[in-house]
């Protein structure tokens, strides 16, 4: 976890993903190592400069996420990670928004059906809705209000294990700051 928590570059996230991959192979009964392996790859996909490099990280993450969903379909955090993966793939080619945004929405809806107060799923839902509204020239005020409301849920949300994901609060704060 310390490698992941201190990672700041694509290379460091890839190194952390490989370590989580090794842990995941040794602990096939736990979802958390595979989750962090994929999360690091998705993060590398967001941050990588070269298109082929981004695509490679995201392809590896997608395979792992789909394998996790086969085992832990009822896990809201994995559905949220799938939505994050789609968000990253959208950044590869914004022209695909019409096909990818509904996939983000479906994953966040699935995550929220499992865990209605999951702030990471709420964040991705709001961000996706804001992107659609911006593209369509819609009003962002309702989503800004939702973002402010969801911000308080981060402190209240009960994580399942000590290794459960906790990311997203800073991203949501940044989103709410852009609303002002």
Image (cartoon, rainbow, N blue to C red):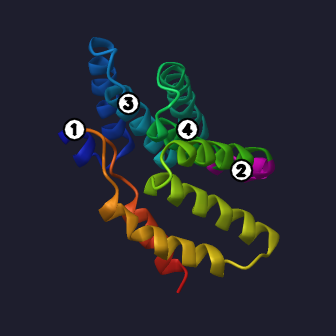
| Mark sitting earlier along the chain (3/2) | 3
Q: Which mark's residue is nearer the viewer, 4 or 1?
A: 4
- Part of the protein shown in magenta: 91-98
Say which mark, if any, is on residue 160: none
Q: Which residue is mark 2?
A: 101
| Mark sitting earlier along the chain (4/1) | 1
- Most common SS among magenta residues: helix
Percent position (x, y) of residue 72? 47, 25
Q: CA distance from mark 1 to mark 3?
A: 11 Å
Q: Which mark's residue is nearer the viewer, 4 or 3?
A: 4
* Residue closest to the far left: 2
Percent position (x, y) of residue 32? 33, 31
Q: Which residue is mark 3?
A: 37
Q: Which residue is mark 4?
A: 82
Please name the residue shown 21% across and 38% down the image: 1
- On whether residue 9 falls in the magenta region, the answer is no
Q: CA distance from mark 2 to mark 1?
A: 31 Å
Could one spot residue 50 in this view of the protein?
A: no
Q: CA distance from mark 4 to mark 1?
A: 21 Å
> Eyeballing the image, is 122 above or below 34?
below
Residue 30, quarter of picture: top left
> Eyeballing the image, is 12 above or below 138?
above
Q: Which residue is mark 1?
A: 1
């Amino acid at each position: 976890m310390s490698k992941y928590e201190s990672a700041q570059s694509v290379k460091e996230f890839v190194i952390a993903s490989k370590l989580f991959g090794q842990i995941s192979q040794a602990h096939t009964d736990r979802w958390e190592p595979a989750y962090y392996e994929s999360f690091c790859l998705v993060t590398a996909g967001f941050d990588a400069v070269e298109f082929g490099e981004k695509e490679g990280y995201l392809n590896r993450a997608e395979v792992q996420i789909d394998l996790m969903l086969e085992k832990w379909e009822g896990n809201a955090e994995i559905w949220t990670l799938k939505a994050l993966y789609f968000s990253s793939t959208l950044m590869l080619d914004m022209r695909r928004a019409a096909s990818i945004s509904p996939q983000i929405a479906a994953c966040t809806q699935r995550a929220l059906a499992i865990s209605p107060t999951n702030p990471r799923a709420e964040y991705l839902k709001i961000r996706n809705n804001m992107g659609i509204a911006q593209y369509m020239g819609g009003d962002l005020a309702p989503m800004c209000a939702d973002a402010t409301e969801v911000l308080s849920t981060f402190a209240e949300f009960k994580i399942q294990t000590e290794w459960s994901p906790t990311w997203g609060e800073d991203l949501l704060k940044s989103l709410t700051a852009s609303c002002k």
